[in-house]
Image: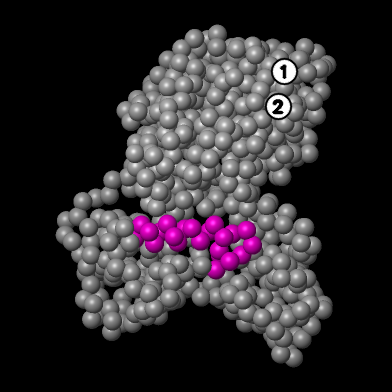
Amino acid sequence: MGVLFPHLFSPLQIGRVTVRNRILSSGHDTVLVRDGSVTEDLIAYHEARAAGGTGLIVLQVSAVHESARYTTHVLMATNDDCVPAYARLARAVHRHGAKVFGQLFHPGREILESRDGSAPVAWAPSATPNERFHVMPRAMTDAEIREVLDGYGQAARRLHEAGLDGAEVVASHGYLPAQFLNPKVNVRTDGWGGDGQGRLRFLREALRSVRRQAGPDFVVGLRISGDEFSHDGLNTGLVLETVAELDAEGLLDYVSVCAGSSASLSGAEHIAPPMFRPAGYTAPLAAQVRAVVGVPVMVAGRINQPQEAEQIIAGGQADACAMTRALICDPELPVKAEQDRTEEIRACIGCNQACIGHFQQGHPISCIQHPETGRERRFGTLPLLTRRKKVLVVGGGPAGLKAAAVAAARGHEVELHEADRRVGGQVLLAQLLPGRAEFGGAITNLEGEARRAGVRVVVGSRVDAQAVTAAAPDAVILATGARPRRPELELMDDPVVLDAWAVIRGSEVPRGRIVVADWRGDWIGLGVALHLAARGRKVTLCVTGFAAGEHLQQYVRAAMLAQAARARIDIVPHVRIHGADSDTVYLQHTLTEEPVLVDGAAAVVLAQGHEPVVDLEPVATGLPADRVFAVGDCVSPRTVEEAVLEGLTVAAGL
């Protein structure tokens, strides 16, 4: 077993700890924390990944001081009361042969929220503001610095007492230790700044505090951005000098390399890089770090498949790979890869919607393809069948495929009918837009799940009420999706008006300026605008909201807006479409109600949302209510996330 990936499935020695393979789940916020404490939901989440074969699990950040409470759902390791809950988590992970490290954390000026909604006071080395959150911190006093440094050691001691195997000091993404290192942020002239050694002092003393208070058996690592990719961030040269010096002093058992900075929008994109970034793009940064230290080096950054990780490790760029979002999407990825079952792996598509997107909205972590993630205690073990049923699923989009897969996996006899020649629904359109080809992987994964579970999939089959009656199913799941919505418009002189679906599918679009009228503010309007610009059209994107793509996860939105800026797409916010003639599009400002005109328009493309397809709703009136279910866009047009979750929920209850 594991013959395909011999390097990935070889053990790794980190300090005094042996990790069974080179796959790790790096630290990431789950919003499964309550009142600063480990919860049973958090334990179940990490236990699922340990059971799936992950070698090392690094927990989300544990705050080392009360001033480090950067969200309302951060873990707090600031008093001894936290030890029993951490211990339960450690035992759960260890039961499955995995190791578990913590993260020791202070955000400095990177504060997101407070407990009561008022603006908190952020601590930093100097009163240097950040760009992303618009926080002006206060400069820490010498006493406050020493208090926080002691907090690193005290927190490490508590994690060690709880039975964790190690911890890493988080100096990545522009957080407090990185702020001390950065000459553009740390402008102190005392012993905590002034020159390179002064700026390094905070991080050096934090590591010494951890080693002194946690003891020699505890693994101590460092997480750091190999490059913050920000206008005022740490660059690779300074990072290499830092890790080389700390390693030479014997302070490190490993280095975990990532990229980016929380302080700017451009830098933050690298915290959870969207699908526009190539796989494993941070590996060269890790290779540079590995060349100057003598301890193991881990790397994170869009490593979604075992073959990518194997190549990075075999090539000597890193000793282990963080496959965090890949494990969110498929907790069993390691065991599948080790057993050479790679075709069963549910590949992450880098959409960011339900993982970091949920975190940024204050919701527990999940995955649009695998909504069981974050809901392990509810869906981790599906209920046993009381009676095998004949289930008819109508519609082969994400909702129908998930419902069919789960129902069949539970033992039901399932038949799925799709009217088109391929299953996939709107995902087949999304994958055609610039930079979103990976999105189609969601259907590849869901269709694979359904077929492996024994679902009979019939394409090119349009089901009507008569067909439902003839099939005589015990349960019908309607997943008939949605169609483009076309609002009432005042049209004169026969203007060219197209819907976004037609444009994505390749309909002819005239030369000249194209106006995209975007109601929703999601991937469709912005994606179609980029698609048209790539085809050589001048584009004006008119959105009803305050920004294009406002309903996209912010790193995805930032990447797409950067592309739009480079493509010279004009964006007009706060407007709704009213009508058009042969060369003018008439809009109305949503705040002032005043007219807004776009002259010289050759065509209008409508991205005005969707309306549900309810053609089969009459079926519901002819069958008992407990035999007909609707899921996905035919209930209400939303996103893949809701469709897949509803498919799971309905099938789990059959």
Res 550 visible: yes
Residue at point 28%, 78% (across, down): 468
Q: Which mark is residue 454?
A: none
537 falls in the magenta region:
no
Q: Quadrant of residue 266?
A: top right
Tell me where residue 334 appears, x and y as whole percent.
Answer: 40, 40
Going from the N terminus, do you reach mark 1 or mark 2 first?
1
User: Which portion, as a residue range, is magenta?
Assistant: 429-450
Q: Residue reaching furthest bottom? A: 493
431 falls in the magenta region:
yes
Residue at point 43%, 72% (across, down): 422
Q: Nearer the viewer, mark 1 or mark 2?
A: 2
- Depth order, front residue of 2/469: 2
Q: Quadrant of residue 447?
A: bottom left
Q: Residue reaching furthest left? A: 387
Q: Is residue 92 left or right of residue 604?
A: left
- Depth order, front residue of 516/18: 18
Give the Cα separation between the discs numbered 1 and 2: 11 Å
Residue at point 55%, 75% (across, down): 484
Q: Amino acid at mark 1?
A: Leu
Residue at label 1?
Answer: 200
Q: Is residue 117 left or right of residue 330?
A: right
Tell me where residue 544 appears, x and y as whole percent.
Answer: 68, 66
Residue at label 2?
Answer: 239
Estimate how packed mark 1 is, as few (under 14), some (14 to 19) or many (20 or more) residues with alpha carbons within 10 Å: many
Q: Secondary structure at mark 2?
A: helix
Tell me where residue 7 appears, x and y as whole percent.
Answer: 46, 34
